[in-house]
Amino acid sequence: MPMFTNIAAYRFASLTDLKALRERLTALCKELELRGTILLSTEGINLFVAGMNENVERLLSDLRTIPGLEQLQAKYSESEHQPFRRMLVKIKKEIISFGIEGVDPVGKPSPKLQPAELKRWLDEGRPITLLDTRNDYEIKLGTFRDAMVFPIRKFREFPAAVATLPEDLKEQPVVMFCTGGIRCEKAGPFMEMQGYKNIFQLEGGILKYFEDCGSAHYDGECFVFDDRVGLDPSLDESESVQCYACQSPLTAEEQADPRYVIKVSCPYCFVPTEAQQAQQVAERNAAIHTATHPLPGSRIYANERPFNIPAAYDGQPLIDCLCGILGHISREEWLQTCESGHLLKRVVPEGMEGPDPIAVPADHIVRGGDRYLHLHPASSEPDVNADIRILYEDEAIIIVHKPAPLPMHPCGRFNRNTLTSILGEVYAPYNPRPVHRLDANTSGIVLFARTRHFAHQLQR
């Protein structure tokens, strides 16, 4: 099986004409069948690339022809598989994002300490502080023994973390380190700007230390930003993986934890079933609060109240049907409503795409089963008690505390300010179905079904 050569390299240098350089490197990497990432900036280059050894070397040779990159050095490792999924060449403002003006890795670099020299210092027990500049999730896999670490999730948080260090550390020797050295290129000068007088950065980072010194004074492995996840002190791929859900790196021991389920959870992000349900109910109640403040019916809107034509009125004029089924409204009012164009007939069934409902006159002949709309063009609804609380929910049912006064269904003056309408908005696109009902002025527990199937089962 052919082995893949993996390289990590960076160089701070003044680069120009970045767009042309990006096109050139993209074409070259495609020709050489390389994968990984190359970051270009006016301040230099940062790359992680893998492929066949001869092709990787051709890329490095080409890069060294670029003014400023003649001394570009790479750190090597091997893998049995291609650790990168694609090839990206990007132009960035910084080759390592830091966001602090005035940091000059080229003109004002911090002193570099060779790995063998650091090992000698540690063997001798010199009084130094080892400072890990990496992110907290990287450190989970390993770091130097007794190193100082920061609880940061990204490198841009490093300056704020430095502000928490004790003042007397500014007079003591501090050796900082990261994966390959690039973060220390900016962290070192920054700390010197803050008054630290004895800053050193580990040349080549942890990976170079592994290459020269192995595991001496180091516990664990080194996190890398590719599919290998971790490298042991022999620079071989470890058994570590990353959690699909939270991206935490996981050792072999952590993968044996019953809370680790591939593509679902790990010991760091696992939430017990009871806690999941409590969180889900809390989120749902927060959504109800948002949906009811202000009350949805308090805004002026066009309210379309539907009604169906009973079979007994088949073939009769619309006005006769209206006076028969909605007799509490006078004939004169219905005639005026029809003349205003506020009686509408659906052209297509509800929920289907098609023409909008059309206005119909009072003498329009109706058919049994047809659906019409009574339009109230500028409506608002009376206030209701919106203290609705979800008590429990699962895949089948929802248990709700209904306050009073609050109608269950759209009726009379109420349409949006009803329990079913509010829950329909919160659970959209699903439409919870009440299994039973309570009067508007009655508070209590109401059971809803999540689907038509469950409603049928519960109502049997």
Image (tube, rainbow, N blue to C red):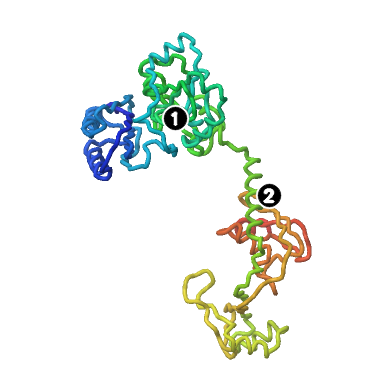
The percent position of residue 220, horizontal first and vertical second, equals: 47, 21
Q: Give the structural element (helix, strand or loop) at label 1.
A: helix
| Mark count | 2
Residue situated furthest top in the rendering: 124
Q: Quadrant of the N terminus?
A: top left
Q: Is residue 287 positioned above or below 133 on the image?
A: below
Given this view, does label 1 or label 2 mark the residue nearer the observer? Answer: 1
Badge 1 crowding class, 10 Å Cα cut-off, few under 14, some 14 to 19, many 20 or more, is many
What residue sits 64% from the left and 62% below the top? Answer: 422
Left/right placement of residue 292 relative to residue 134 reads: right
Label annotation for residue 392: 2
Q: What amino acid is labelled 2 in the image? A: Tyr
Query: Looking at this view, is 433 or 213 the one in front?
Result: 213
Q: Residues within 10 Å of mark 2 (few under 14, many from 20)?
A: some
* Residue at the image position 43 percent from the left and 37 percent from the top: 98
Q: Which numbered tag is attached to residue 187?
A: 1
Q: Nearer the viewer, residue 450 or 329?
A: 329
> Residue 199 placed where, x, y %?
45, 22
Q: Quadrant of residue 115?
A: top left
Query: How many angstroms separate mark 1 from mark 2 (CA)?
Result: 50 Å
| Amino acid bearing label 1 | Ala
Residue 143 lies, in percent from the top left, at: 48, 22
N-terminal of the pair, mark 1 or mark 2, is: 1
